Amino acid sequence: PVRSKDELGMLAQAFNKMSRDLANALRLRRQMTADIAHELRSPLTVLSGYAEALSEGKLKGNPDIFNVLHQETRQLSRLVDDLRLLSLADAGELSLLLQPTDVRALLEQVITRHSVTAEQKGIQLHLQVSEGLPKAKLDPDRMAQVLDNLILNAFRYTPAGGWVRLSAETLPAGGIRLKVADNGSGIAPEDLPFIFERFYRADKARQSNQESGLGLAIARSIVEAHGGRISAESQPGSGATFIIELPST
């Protein structure tokens, strides 16, 4: 208990805060370990079941079975790659190949890459870039990875007939603001503070969507490695907007 407001009281407050932070870090570590085990268990169970049935002759190999095995191994590979990237970010060892980058050209490439998927889903994909947008010193491949994650996330929650917009503008104090907005189902207020946490899924009904649950956590790690920040705004039923602010070079 804190019994005074002098230096001993301040020390007690600092000690209590440290204790709470350590307890919370331990809780998060245990939760992440449980989440990783859960994510690994599903594809491994499928692979093990099929492998056992094939080895015992209970199943005969066919293209459908081979396709299932291939999809499950790809899911495992994605999960391992995502966890490795986050581990590097946690250790401060996420390598970035920073270079002056034409942001408009980068965004156009991202739009081109996802235009076919958007057409297949019946979603309009727009690009909006302010005039005179300066070059930014960033890792174009890593930043494209961030935007890919955000656009695919927008596709997931935007119905046919909806739209997704990728935009860029110059900040008043310098730097660049990127946005990925949609008019999909949006994010509930109680979920919004946690969406960048690892393995957090706002829609618990969408557990088996071939995603690792790490996309937004990876996006945050990459943006912060650039010295930037990422946030989200949303109203349920009115879509969501993810905002990236990058510092000036």
Image (spheres, rainbow, N blue to C red):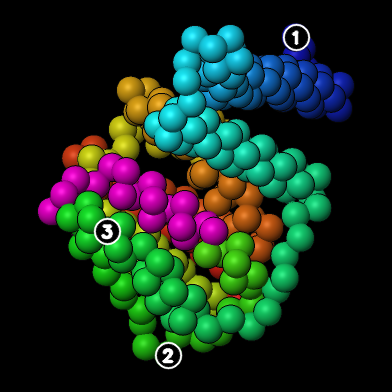
Q: Nearer the viewer, residue 184 or 61?
A: 61
Question: Residue 148 colored magenta?
Answer: yes
Q: CA distance from mark 1 to mark 2?
A: 58 Å
**Residue drawn at point x = 24 percent, y = 47 percent:** 158
Q: Residue at x 44, y 30 (%)?
A: 62
Q: Is residue 193 visible?
A: no
Residue 1 badge: 1
Q: Which residue is mark 2?
A: 132
Work out whether 91 lies above or below 28.
Answer: below
Residue highlighted by disc 3? 118
**Horizontal side of residue 134 vs 31, given as left or right:** left
The answer to whether the residue labelled 2 contacts the one labelled 3, judged by CB atoms less than 8 Å apart, is no
> Under tag 2, what secondary structure?
loop
Q: Is disc 3 placed on a helix, strand or loop?
A: helix
Q: The disc labelled 1 sits on which kind of residue? A: Pro
Q: Residue at 30% of width from left, 63% of height from top?
A: 116
Q: Which residues are magenta?
A: 145-165
